[in-house]
Image: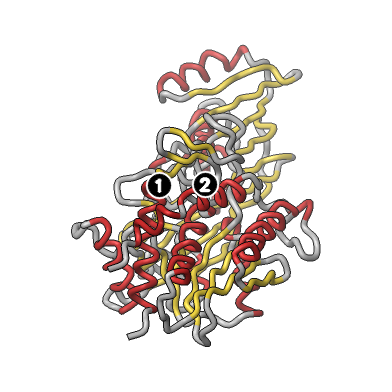
Amino acid sequence: MINFLEEANKRKDDMLADIQTLCRIPSVLDKTTANEGQPFGIQCRKVLEAMLAIAQRDGYAYENVDGYAGHIDIGNKEETFGILGHLDVVPCNQTGWNTNPYDMTIKDGKIYGRGVADDKGPLIAAYYAAKIIDELDIPVKMKIRVIFGCNEENGSECMKYYFTKKPYPQMGFTPDAGFPVVYGEKAMYHSQISGEIEKDNIICLFGGKTTNIVPETCEAYITGYYKQYRDSFNQYLDLHHLTGTIEAEGNHTKLVLVGKSAHASLPDLGINATTYMCHYLATISNNKLVHFINDYLYNDHYGEKLGIKYDGLMGPLTVNPGVTQYKDGYAKVILDMRVPHEEIPEFISDKINNAIKDYGLSETHHYGKALYVDPNSDLIQSLHNAYVEFTGDHMHKPQAIGGGTYAKTMPHCVAFGPEFPGNDNKIHQNNEEMAVDDLMKATAIYAKALYNLLKED
């Protein structure tokens, strides 16, 4: 009997070193340095090259697919089992980190840094799981292809491009969610609401940098001297247990409100700084953008005020106002919604348009379909059984989630780990973390799952 946890721990130091190598590269989307061979910017190219260098070091075949993505082949069978992970990360807040976010830090049995849990650490865990299968010379039915892209956090254009150049594996998983195995992912509905808005006393308003994160900070610039707003703003912060600042900005006033970031699929775990800012601004301004956000988006994570609240087999529809920009009288709000597979996108669009018509705004949207794999399929059951073997957890069953992963980019693919039930790896938040023991256990689970699925009879 192979002790996969023991095999994982033998490789722990090497795994941590490789994770650190990847985390030291701030691989955030950077369109200003995008070019041929680096479509997502220079740092994403560097991290792709770093992952390919690991394959070269270990003696495996590898390929860079035009800077969009790459892969490493372990084994030489004709059929392929795919492991899909991503090397790009979301931006870090300038404050709130206790360590350098772009340098993996080990402290009290945990690793900290942007990407240690989403998704550089889990990608390395899955890669080493594949290495364990290879290094133990276990006869397998398929080669393992570890595929990694650089644009998962901004639409997965990397993997969409990759699969125009390379064939789909027969099946696979992505280590980019949680345990137990994920059989379903909600549909993605991104709504852009925009239009010309009379300023009233609002000069500009900025909240959020990316749609799939609950915005932690929001800045507003308003006319008038700051002392006329100071008392009411500070009272508002105290009443709602928030922090922020108010100061003079030339002849005007600058307000900053600080909330709490969270993944857009779980907006109730965050405090949306933009909606709270607008809740305050609505008391001192007639600006229609402010009032739309306050009327329809403040303190409502499930679309009840918009008339789109819905609970399905995958759970509730969720709404995150991820990005808000208002300048020179032009407003743009981008909503990130995670939608159960039973809901109809046309219904959502109709309800949003009905809500915004009185504010002089219009809506466009992009809809990405839901993913659903039969929970009783061999793929789901084999992955789940590997999880149960190492955890003894019979209570948590295969699940559906609101997060979107690479699993949607190819057939017969699902998300699997690495976050364990009850844990919070602070994905997309300050001080992203992962326990080293959890990393080793995830590696062992992945190795056992590959063994269950691929070993020759």
Front in this rendered view, residue 371 or 317: 371
Front in this rendered view, residue 212 or 136: 136
The residue lying at 45 percent from left, 61 percent from top is 175
In this view, the mark in front (1 or 2): 2
The residue lying at 26 percent from left, 76 percent from top is 376
Mark 2 surroundings: few (<14), some (14-19) or many (≥20) residues within 10 A: many
Q: Position of residue 200 (x, y in %)?
A: 65, 32
Q: Is residue 263 left or right of residue 46?
A: left
SS at mark 1? Answer: loop
Where on the picture, by quarter, is residue 397?
bottom left
Q: Is residue 41 left or right of residue 336?
A: right
| Type of amino acid under label 1 | His
Front in this rendered view, residue 336 or 69: 69
Seen as rendered, the residue at the extreme left is: 394
| Type of amino acid under label 2 | Ile
The residue lying at 59 percent from left, 42 percent from top is 208
Whether residue 176 is visible, yes or no, is yes
The residue lying at 41 percent from left, 23 percent from top is 241
Lower sequence index among marks 1 and 2: 2
SS at mark 2? Answer: loop
Would you place residue 227 above or below residue 345 in this image?
above
Numbered tag placed on residue 18 in the rendering: none
Q: Which residue is identified by label 1?
A: 301
Numbered tag placed on residue 213 in the rendering: 2
Marks 1/2: CA distance?
A: 13 Å
Q: Position of residue 145 (x, y in %)?
A: 53, 74
Q: Position of residue 18 (x, y in %)?
A: 57, 52
